[in-house]
Image (cartoon, rainbow, N blue to C red):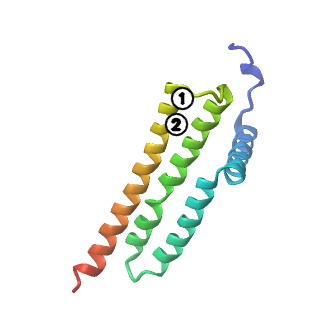
Amino acid sequence: MLNGERYKKKGLKRLISACRNSWKGFMAAWSYEAAFRQELFIFIALGVIALLLPVDLADKFILIVSMLPVLMIELINSAIEAIIDRIGLEEHELSARAKDLASAAVLISLLIVILVWCFILWKNFYLTF
């Protein structure tokens, strides 16, 4: 048996603990990460717009689901930044590179949203004229 393995939570207790930890992560992102709050507001606004657009249900679903990776990658980006800041606040090339790479991942996820939205809107509105 590995060190501490017999003390690990199992079953429903583990699931409840995991959900509690996830909620604490959301609350930390909301409290400390302005970018997460901004992206969440954009997600909500675009989600409402997607629901109101005169497109079929599948397109609404695609528009909304395409935005979820932005929030997910922003959480990962924030986690990487927190870990690096925990290690030390002094300038270091590898720390800056890690933060820049994580930021680039967020940018790519935003570009995917833009491309998906442009395609769905083009498909539904430009092709009908």
Task: Name the amino acid type tagged 2.
Answer: Lys
Measured as percent of width and height from the top left, residue 91 is found at 57, 28
Rendered-image quadrant of the C terminus: bottom left
Q: Which residue was labeled with disc 2? A: 99
Q: Secondary structure at mark 1?
A: helix
Nearest the eye: 112 or 21: 112
- Neighbor class of circle 1 (other Cα within 10 Å; few <14, some 14-19, many 20+) is some
Task: Count how many numbered circles sit on residues in the image.
Answer: 2
Q: Is residue 121 left or right of residue 84?
A: left
The amino acid marked with disc number 1 is Ser
Marks 2 and 1: CB-CB under 8 Å? yes
Frontmost residue, 128 versus 32: 32
Q: Is residue 24 left or right of residue 70?
A: right
Q: Can you give x and y, in whole percent of width and height, for residue 29 in the image?
A: 66, 49
Q: Is residue 105 left or right of residue 32?
A: left
Q: Which residue is mark 1?
A: 95
